[in-house]
Image (tube, grey):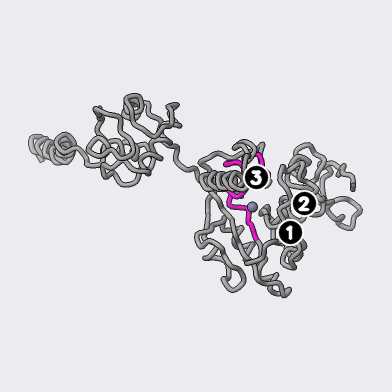
Amino acid sequence: MSTQIRRTMAALLILILLIPAVSAIGEGENVPAANTAQPVSPAAVLRNGSKGEDVKQLQLRLTELGYDPGKADGVFGKGTKTALQEFQKRNGLEADGEAGPQTIEKLFSGDAAAKPQPQTVDVLEGYLPMLVNKTHPVDEFLVPGDLVLLADVLDSKLVKIKYADTKAVREVAEALDEMLQAAKADGVTKWQISTAYRSYAQQEKTLNNKISHYLSANKGWSRSKARSAALRTVAEPGCSEHQLGLAIDINVPGASSFAGTKQCKWLHEHCWEFGFIVRYTADKKEITGFEAEAWHIRYVGTEHALRIRELGMCLEEYLEGIENGTVKLFPEQETDGTGENKENGEIEEILLDDD
Ligand SMILES: [Zn+2]
């Protein structure tokens, strides 16, 4: 092949490769994508009830930034207002849900803060159980990995799932199933799951509902008084174990109280064998910050659960003890018959009292 022909072929090849790129640039220039927001400068403040192209661009921009105003239909409704308020909060603006000049300027600027994306975390990854409480909150955007619908794992003949969309981490759901099968073998049936995984947003809603409940039930209570009362049984968003997908609220369908039922008695005797601990008990409320909750169990895995029962500790005490060396993870290893301990002696003696 002559040099001339080779050069011509190379030139043709380059041309062929360039054509799609050139035409793509052309498309981009001539036809703006329908879902890309264009900056606007509305004549009046956009608010609930506003309509038109400016509202549509506002909705498209909120969507681009990860806030969810619903369909970009050019009608400023409740969804747009909520999304706009979320944007305003995250961007240091007054969260009035109205798009005035300041909000519009920020929204279409390069430094408009987008809504952070959910972060999927393997909540069972570490060797020690994750601690979540009032002083150890988790990030708003933490979502546990491997969530499954309880209805897909549990036997519907053994347990009623109060809300069909209830999820938990798969390993937890499977341990729960195993536990309920064992309860049945012991003649204990009729269970209900009322809560398992609860997102940060759902937790926020749960707390607000509780505050409203106290406000309407107690004439004259201030909001802060109702909030304090609510926080005795409902965790602040980010401070609930339910956000880990490792906690289960289990009770008896139709019963007004769980404590005192035969199901409760069985649960408190046996849940440990399946990796669950009774998380909030009356004798530990000063440490956990929660009143006793007979129905709330937390998955920590069988080894930890049995050890925690043996030590009579709550999770806070257990983890602190491990950290400061007063708790050994597992009891003394048995000797191997030579009189020597199988362990190499590096682990310190248990320094716990029995009281
Ligand atoms: Zn609970």
Quadrant in the picture for residue 24: top left
Q: Which secondary structure, mark 1?
A: helix
Q: How many marks?
A: 3
Q: Position of residue 4 (x, y in %)?
A: 8, 35
Q: Which secondary structure, mark 3?
A: loop
Per the rendered image, the range of residues in magenta is: 227-250
Residue 130 disc label: 3
Find the distance from the CA under tag 1 to the CA under tag 3: 17 Å
**Tag 3 or tag 1, which sits nearer the N-term?**
3
Q: Position of residue 337 (x, y in %)?
A: 89, 58
**Which residue bears the numbered disc 2?**
308
**Tag 3 or tag 2, which sits nearer the N-term?**
3
Asked if the residue under mark 2 is in contact with the one under mark 1, i.e. CB atoms within 8 Å, the reply is yes
**Which residue bears the numbered disc 1?**
272
Viewer-nearest residue: 249 or 216: 216
User: Which residue appears at 89% of the width and 51% of the height?
Assistant: 340
Find the distance from the CA under tag 2 to the CA under tag 3: 14 Å
55 magenta-colored? no
Q: Amino acid at mark 3?
A: Met
Mark 1 crowdedness (10 Å alpha carbons): few <14, some 14-19, many ≥20:
many
